[in-house]
Amino acid sequence: MMGFNTFGWGFGGGFMMLFVWLIGIFLVVLVVKLLVTNGKCQSHTHAEEILKERYAKGEMTKKEFDEKIRGIRGE
């Protein structure tokens, strides 16, 4: 049985360990990103800010503003 000892790693031990580490790193990055953005989609908030600026400048009516905000939020 010499040469067949995998030290408990089983089939593909090195590759499986690499895979586990990559999954772990991915999950950590994902959690940090969600915490930083507070779970909000940044493109939605950016679009809403642009609409608020345009409304404040008088470039659109209240009705147009409300319609576009609902469209962005998916309501």
Image (spheres, grey):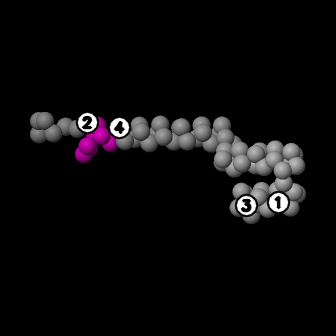
Q: Is residue 42 left or right of residue 15?
A: right
Which residue in the rendered view is the most extreme toward the bottom?
A: 75
Sequence order check, earlier mark of 3 and 1:
1
Q: Would you say 29 lies left or right of 15 here?
A: right
Q: Which mark is residue 45?
A: none
Q: What span is colored magenta in the figure?
A: 8-16
Q: Could you give the CA–CA distance between mark 2 and mark 3, rounded to whole angstroms?
A: 58 Å
Q: Amino acid at mark 4?
A: Leu
Alpha carbon separation for disc pair 3 and 1: 11 Å
10 Å neighbourhood of mark 3: few (<14), some, or many (≥20)? Answer: few
Q: Earlier along the polypeptide chain: callout 3 or callout 4?
A: 4
Residue type, mark 2 in image: Phe
Q: Which residue is mark 4?
A: 18
Which circle, 4 or 1, is nearer the viewer? 1
Q: Residue at x 84, y 50 (%)?
A: 59
- Give residue 48's position: percent from left, percent from top: 76, 49
Between 19 and 34, the one lying in front of the other is 34
Residue under pointer 3: 71
Q: Residues within 10 Å of mark 1 (few under 14, many from 20)?
A: few
Q: For the point 82% across and 60% down, which residue is it?
A: 64
